[in-house]
Amino acid sequence: MSVPTPRRARRLAVLTLASAFVLAGCAERAEEPAPPSSSAEEAAATFPVTLTPAEGEPVTIEERPERIVSLSASNTETLFAIGAGEQVVAVDDQSTYPEEAPRTDLSGLTPNVEAVVGYDPDLVVLSDDANNLVASLTQLDRDVLIVPAAATLDDLYEGMELLGEATGHAEEAGDVAERVRGDLEKVVADTPKPDEPLSYYHELDTTFYSATSKTFIGQVYGLFGLTNIADPADKDAGGYPQLSVEHILRSDPDLIFLADVNCCGQNARTVAARPGWNALTAVREGNVVELDDDLASRWGPRVVDLAESVAEAVTKASQGR
């Protein structure tokens, strides 16, 4: 007689409870589950797998997860992109893409273990261990995988492949990573190179926090040879310095990218109305770029869309010279 795994034991408990409802008078008969497809069977055959994330200890996943909870918007996008969307039963309140993602009021910033377990997950995907969630979930026999925020493009590709292995979609994840890499290379290759490097300011919010070249977003800009005015201001080397208005005006960037459009109502008009900003080259030449806040803050397959926005701005600024 075989001993059920923790996941099977949980499933047996759920089935037992369901049977009780039927005996109590439930009139509807549950549909018989469809037999697994050959691709699902092949994916299941790759388990168990042991994964070593960039942060945390090695994780062994015994069976292909069928109930995934994602508490990271970027990882949610990747899960759906690699074909694991049907396995996702809940995502956090910041996971706004894709539209079909089962968005809930779960928080990835201040996660609640009881709320997460309420979705009966067999795999929980995080970007960091907020509230010591990993230990709490592990004690409850739930698999947990941390795929941290990407600091480089290589981190992005590795995170995709890690999620692919964890969910039984290794081949699809590899294909997505290669496609993203190839699309980025093409966008960069098709973008004209200015005679002299263009400088830029990336605005995270209206208090003038920015991102340096060492961050993931900074690496995307770096693909186009842009000079980041935030780099000299990064005194603590954290990658996200708060710039002074004086520093921005003195640096006179050729391009301004706004990542606070949706959150803070910023646009080319509001930037031009700031005291002294109408004299900036980017403002005078119409090179204030309004980004999608989500695209500018997430590491995922849609980084290509972000790169295309940058490419369009670089092309326009180059032609204006």
Image: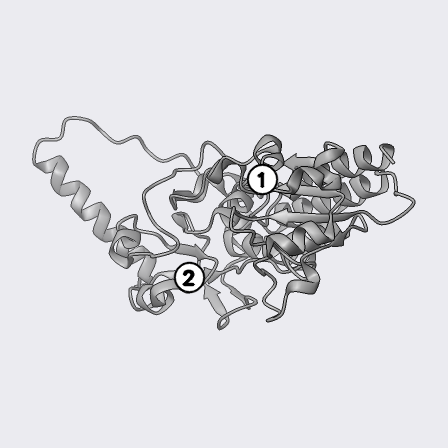
Q: Provide residue 144's location: percent of width, then percent of height.
A: 42, 61
Which is nearer the eye, 12 or 2? Answer: 12
Extreme residue in the right direction? 195
**On residue 24, which mark appears?**
none
Three-letter amino acid code of the residue under disc 2:
Val
Q: Provide residue 227's location: percent of width, then percent of height.
A: 77, 54
Numbered disc in front, either 1 or 2: 1
Does residue 195 lie above or below 273 as drawn?
A: below
Answer with the quarter of the image where residue 175 lies.
top right
Q: Provide residue 294's location: percent of width, then percent of height.
A: 54, 41
What secondary structure is found at the residue carrying circle 2? strand
Three-letter amino acid code of the residue under disc 1:
Arg
Q: Which badge, 1 or 2, comes first in the chain's sequence?
A: 2
The answer to whether residue 214 shows anywhere in this view is yes
Extreme residue in the top direction? 27
From the viewer's perspective, is 133 left or right of 273? left
The residue where tag 1 is placed is: 274
Q: Provide residue 129's location: percent of width, then percent of height.
A: 41, 65
The colouring scheme, among rainbow, by chain, secondary structure or one colour, is one colour
Q: Residues within 10 Å of mark 1 (few under 14, many from 20)?
A: few
Pointers 1 and 2 in contact (CB under 8 A)?
Answer: no
Q: Residue at x 32, y 33 (%)?
A: 32
What secondary structure is found at the residue carrying circle 1? loop
Task: Work out which quarter of the rendered image holds the C terminus and state it.
Answer: top right
Task: Work out which quarter of the rendered image holds the N terminus and state it.
Answer: bottom left
The residue where tag 2 is placed is: 144
Answer with the quarter of the image where residue 182 lies.
top right
